[in-house]
Structure formats: C-alpha cells, structure tokens
Image: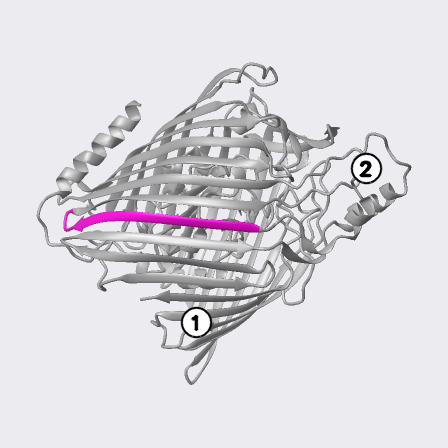
Amino acid sequence: MRANLVFTCSFAILALSLATPAQAQDQSGEGEPDYHHGDADIVVTGLLHTSRQDALSGVAVLTQEQLTGAIRPSIGDTLAHTPGVSATSFGPSASRPVLRGLQGERVRVLSNGIGSIDVSNTSADHAPAINPALASRIEVLRGPQSLQYGSAAIGGVVNVIDKRIPETVPDEPIHLTALGTYATASEARSGAGSLELPLGNGWVGHLDGSYLKTSDLRIGGHTLTPALRAEALASSLLPPDPLADPEIDFTANAALTGRLPNTAAKTWSAGIGLAYINDGGNIGVAYSHLDNFYGIPIRFATQPGQGQEAPRLKMKQDRIDARAELLLDGSLIEKVTVRYAYGDYSHSELEPDGAIGTTFLNKGMEGRLDLVQATRDGWKGASGIQYMNRDFNVIGDEAFLPRNDTEQLGVYTLQQYNSGSLLLEAGGRLEHSKLVSSPEPGQPQFFAGNRSFDAWSFALGAAYDFAPGWKFGANLSRVERAPSAEELFANGPHAGTEALEVGDPGLTKESAWSAEAILRGEIDGLTVEASIYRSWFSGFVYEARTGAIEDGLPVYQIRQADARMWGFEAQASWRFAESGHWTFHADGLIDYVRTDISGSGPAPRIPPLRLMGGLKAKSAHFDVAAEVERVTAQTRTAAFETATPGYTMINLELHWRPADNDSPLSLVLSANNLFDVEARRHASYLKDYAPLAGRDIRLTVRVEI
C-alpha cells in the first residue's frame, strides 16, 4: 500500500509539473531518437538510450519493417530467428523466448518497460499476455542495462514496445498502422491496427485492436517421435490393462500425422490511450483488454496407465498503464520518469467437455521511478527504484500451487563514461523479495509460511574503438536471483503440462558470475558481430524429470546445484554486389550454448548448435530472400530426457513496397519450411509430442499512413 501511494504521488507531481501552458510539438524528449519511425540503430530499452553498436553485450532489435515478416502469434516464435534466441514451443500459442538456453523465471518479458503481469513464468503452457501483432518494435537486451528490470532478468530482457501511450504528436490528422496476415499451416486469419489522433493543444489519443483465429496446426510428419510411436504400437499388442483407460487407442496415437490436435486458437484485444505532450515532457494513461482461447498439444499416451488430456485455456487480462516524463534543464538531473501498470489476469484450464478444471488468478502491479542524470564531460547515468507486487492463486482439484504473494523492492543505478574511443559502464542493483505461501484449509501438501531474500547484483563493462568502424567490448557481472513462488511452493498435478510438479521450499538464492566479450565491425560492405560468454552458477535452479509416474503423470522436481554455462553467437552480413537498382547481400548466423550441472551432467532443454545462411536481393520496391536454417541434433541430454534429431528448413520471402522504401504499404509473401520437414525444438517440454509447423505459406500486409 505504501509503495502504491509513493508512485501515485510521484505521478501526480509530474502531472502538475506538465500542466503548464506550452507549445505542443512532435517530440519524444530532447536529444532522444524517434524510434517509432525507423531509427533501427538506437536501443531504447533501458534508462540510457544508446547506439546498438555501443552495447556491451549481445543485443537484438526487430524494427517494424522486420516484424512485418517475422510476426507470429507468440513472442517466442516471433523472435525464434534472432541470435541466441530459441523458443519454448508449447504449441503455436504458448511459445515464450529462450535466451541462451535460459527460460521461464530467468527471462523477463516486458511491455513498454513494465512486466507483462501474467503467469507465463509459472509454466510453459501459459502464454504471455502480450500481443506481438501490435508491436512497433521488439528489443532483446542482456548485460549491465538488464539490471534495471529485476533479478528475474538474469537471462535477459525481451521488451515489446507499442504506441498505446503516445510519445509524439503525429503530423497527420490521423496516424494509422494496420497489419493483416493469412498463414496456411494453421489457417490463421489475423488483423491488428492502431490509431493515433492529435486532439489539439498537445493532447494525443490512441485506439488499437487485434483479432486472430487459427485451426489446428499442420505439421510435417508424425505427431509422436519414432520411439514413442513404437512404444504405442507395442502397447496396443498387450492384453487389456484394468487400470488403463479403455478409450485410449494406442494404435491411433502412433498413426497421428498431418495435424497437431487441440492447437486451434481465438484471440482478440482492444486498447485505448491518452497522452499530453509538451516541451516539458509528457504524461499519459492507457487501458487494454486481452481475451485469449487456445488449446495445448496433447501429450498422447503410449503406455497403459498414462493419462491423456486435451487441455484448453481461456485467458483474459485487464490492464492499466500510466507514464509520466518530466524534462528538466538542471545541471544534475535531465529527466524524471514514472511508469506504472496494474493487471487483473485470470485463466481457466478447461476439460474436454468445457467444464473448468483449474483457474489461475493473478492481480499485480509494477511501478518504477527513474532519474536520468545530465551528461557532463562524457559522463551520464541513471538511477531508480522499482516495486512489484503479485497476489496469485490457483483454484481447482488440480491446483499445484497454494495461494501466494510476492513483493519485491529494488534500487539500481547505471553509469556510463564515454571519452570518444573508450566507453565504460557500471551498474548495480539491491533487491529485497518476500514470498508468502498461504494454503487454503484442506491443502496440507503445500508449504505454509514465508521466505525472504536480499539479492545484490553488479556489472562492469568497457568498449574500445580499436580501428575505424571496429569495436571490442567486454563485461563482467555478478547477479543474484531470488527463487520464484513456483519454484518454492509447487506440489501437485498440472493439467496444462500434464505433469506432476514439485517445488522445494528450502531453495536458496541463485547467483552467477558471468563474463562476455563482443566484437563489432564493418568494412567494405561486410558487417560482423560476434560474442562469446561464460557463466558460473551457484545454486542453479532447474526442473528435472525424476522418471517416476504418479497418477499417470510424469514427475518433475525442482532441484538446485552449481552449474557452468558457455556459448557463442555470431552474425554477419555482406553486400557483395550491385547491379542497377539492386544490391545483393549474403547473411549468416551461428549460435551455441552448453550448460552442465555439477553432479548431474547436461542441463535439460538446452538448444543445440544452429546455423543459418541466406541470400537477399534488395531494391527500392522489392526484397527477395532465400534462407537455409540448420539445427543440429541435441544428444547432450539430462536424465530421462530424450535426444532430439536435427533438421534443415528452407525459407523464401518476397517483400514488396509499391511506392519505395518509405512506402506506406508493404506486402510480404513467404514460404516457411518449404519442404515440409518434421522439426522439433529441444527447448520444448513437448518436443516428443508436438513438432513445429510444416510448410507454411504466409501473406502479410502492413499499412502505415
């Protein structure tokens, strides 16, 4: 309550400061980039906007033009071709980003710099309450700046940026952005649009909406892996088991091909925003509603006694966002920013007959107050305070978590010094977390009580321009993370994942020393970026399959041990020829991560080596591209984890701008997985039951006027 009052008062003070007569103008802050209109080189996630070339760790930016071809129903699949990024692939609707092999609680998914306020970190079957179709930009951030967003960002930050609270006054009477897509693999029909309307005297209104409907996903090959198909066929030859479900046809399960059952979805969203912008800054508020209904791929039974369900999730969220920014002329403080969001989230896991099995309820808020220092002799910095509160409950016969509350308060600072050829950066964060478990009467299986943690984190980095157009950077960090309520308190069956999940109330803090070196450069049309990293974890928290089966469900146990992780990423683009109005480019990407747990061996669900290469021809009106993606087999597996075969996909894309590079209309026609191969992501819990999409022909149209 005190934290809510602090942020409310801070917001009110900034509002009063802005409520002075001023000439409204199209601006987003003095000296700041107009990133909504294509400034691809500027990374805006974080308090200190910086050039991507100066970032001290691997950073990825998907601009609006790139999103036109990359957009998918889930954030994970939208980012799946980004260096160092894989996806959880729990079906086409619930796919969350995996950053350098880390997923779940270690990756923060943000909406305009504030958490998604959902339960997507709780389990892989829970989709984030963020719609990428409305994004104007998505950024993936690691390194020192990620400390601003909490200890859960130990793996990195994915920030989905939209225009729900306007930051600029449009030049046009109405600024319209619209996106429409049809995709054959899921028969997806989707549309999304947003409007910004200048109302006069510095006021700007915003409206947006989206709609998506899909059928069951078409796949290349069989639903089950060869090993599971053989197991199911062998089960069909056994005498009837009195404990087995007589309705399960193992032969039919083994023969499933062509479509991934129970993956259809229907989603819609709507939002409204209002902002006041003047020379002194801006202030705004927005309301949004998201309604999502989607199915989870079935973990088909292959042996007598196994459970088999077809869970579907009906999810909704109502969210309020507020932002205020005050620009100052002071010699010490340049800008003060307040951001706040409140979310009321719920989803129900439905039985095949439509009855509600389990309901997840989450009410939460997050707020932050940031102070950005004025630049002095190459020195700039920012500091702030962040508060988050979550009230979470699970109701139903298969409630695997007790009612719990999480409260976090963090203070942080980030400082930079730039002498021209040398850039130095340092950041630090102190965070206090309190987690309280309050089981209902009749739930003796759950831990009752509270856990508190104080986490200290810091990061140091430097970058040096050692030759014209070439930069070498390095960073060192030590980050601590408090375990989540899900990792501490879970104990029971979860229908969505068709697993029995068991937490550990005795978990300690997870900490990691990490080092990364990065090289960026450009010469004679060749652009290169490469990084190598290593982490030493103490108390690494992971979910391991034990091999036990209870009530027909596999048991997954939260465990903790030391771990080592290392990996690398590299990408290059070469403009190797020009002819008339055309330029010709060759692109390449490679990434790899390896994680080993002390006393256990390889960590579960770590993506294997991936290589991508492509050729592209570009002109003012057309881009034509062909791409080959090779994902190698993953044979380094954890206990009770199966190996995943490699696959090769061929993708083609045609991008047409009828006018020119600044055309308000663009069309993208793409053929993904052209040869309809059967592909499975090792990072997915359901990889042996749910392959990726087969051949997918997509047509996307974007209009911005």
**Front-most of residues 678 and 51:** 678
Q: Secondary structure at mark 2?
A: loop
- Residue 506 lies, in percent from the top left, at 56, 19
Q: Is residue 350 magenta?
A: no
Q: Is residue 482 above or below residue 159?
A: above
Kind of residue at disc 2: Pro
Most distant residue in the left direction: 21
In magenta, the rendered stretch is 265-280
430 lies above or below 675: above
Residue at mark 2 to residue at mark 1: CA–CA distance: 65 Å
Check the picture and name the quadrant holding the C terminus: bottom left
User: Which residue sits at x=43%, y=39%?
Assistant: 317
- Residue at point 73%, 37% (across, down): 640
Q: Residues within 10 Å of mark 2 (few under 14, many from 20)?
A: few
Let me know if residue 277 is in the magenta part: yes
Where does label 2 land, which residue?
246
85 or 69: which is nearer to us? 69
Which residue in the protein does label 1 denote? 525
